[in-house]
Amino acid sequence: MSLYRDEGVVLRAQKLGEADRIITLLTREHGRVRAVAKGVRRTTSRIGARLEPFGHVDVQFYAGRTLDGINQVETLSSYGSVLVGDYARYTAGQAMLETAERLTPEEREPSTQQYLLLVGGLRALVGGEHDPGLVLDSYLVRSLSVAGWAPSFDACARCGIPGPHRAFNIAAGGALCADDRVPGSAAPAMETFALLAALLTGDWHIADASDARARREASGLVTAYLNWQLERGLRSLPLVERTP
């Protein structure tokens, strides 16, 4: 039997047959992996509770014909036990899990940066030091950047001239100068541009000091940009509780 071991975050668990589940994980070394966990839906299972979404686990896999299997699991962190008691943090976390799965379309393709970004985002949610909506938006723009779709919030996305600029166009890739502005571009407030740049770079001093209007506008632009790049919206994103 060919065995390998990796650590990962459980993204999804699907029922299989009467007692099994297909577990989707984003792992450090092997990227997104789907594997069968046999018997985990039985009450006698010793590892079933460790393979729930949000679980940060160390897993031993064995090679299978179609899907690999899981035969050992050790819990590293149980983020779900904290997030499940807070609607805002839980829904933000669900959006992170779905995004991580969508941005790693090829199974077994190493995605270490996406893995580390997801773990860091979940830790930030559990820590509760920042607004859940800000943590989510920061995760979204950073994960898009890692995937190769980095938005520009300062320099013009077309000509590269330094900002600040007044226009933002999703299809063009972000901020646009006056010469490159195209019809249909949004005109976010300067405070919104500053917030978006802070979320991308992890400047929490600026992000935490932002007002509700800038947060709402930034969230709308991040969501629109994400949907444009993915070509299909996230199912979990409409459920996220945002700053009123």
Image (cartoon, rainbow, N blue to C red):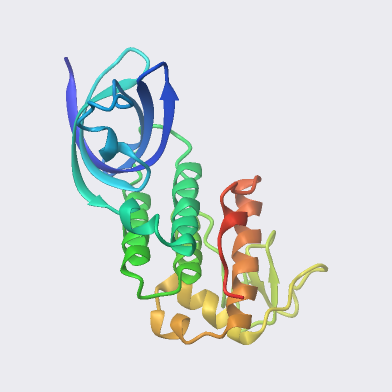
Q: Residue at x 50, y 68 (%)?
A: 133
Q: Number of marks in the image?
A: 0
Residue 46 in the image, given as x and y percentages of width and height: 19, 31
Q: Nearer the viewer, residue 164 or 230?
A: 230
Q: Residue at x 43, y 62 (%)?
A: 86
Q: Nearer the viewer, residue 3 or 70?
A: 70
Quadrant in which residue 119 is drawn: bottom left
- Left or right: residue 169 versus residue 19 is right
Q: Nearer the viewer, residue 180 or 15?
A: 15
Q: Residue at x 36, y 71 (%)?
A: 128
Residue 51 in the image, given as x and y percentages of width and height: 30, 37
Q: Nearer the viewer, residue 195 or 181?
A: 195
Q: Residue furthest top?
A: 65
- Left or right: residue 53 versus residue 167 is left
Quadrant in which residue 185 is drawn: bottom right
Q: Residue furthest front?
A: 43
Give the quarter of the figure containing the N terminus: top left
Residue 158 in the image, given as x and y percentages of width and height: 65, 67
Asked whether residue 129 is in view, the answer is: yes
**Is 139 rendered above or below residue 131?**
above
Q: Residue furthest right?
A: 183
Q: Residue at x 29, y 16 (%)?
A: 64
**Is 114 rendered above or below residue 162?**
above
Asked whether residue 109 is in view, the answer is: no
- Left or right: residue 174 versus residue 66 is right
Residue 218 in the image, given as x and y percentages of width and height: 60, 73
Give the quarter of the figure containing the C terminus: bottom right
**Is 201 rendered above or below residue 206?**
above
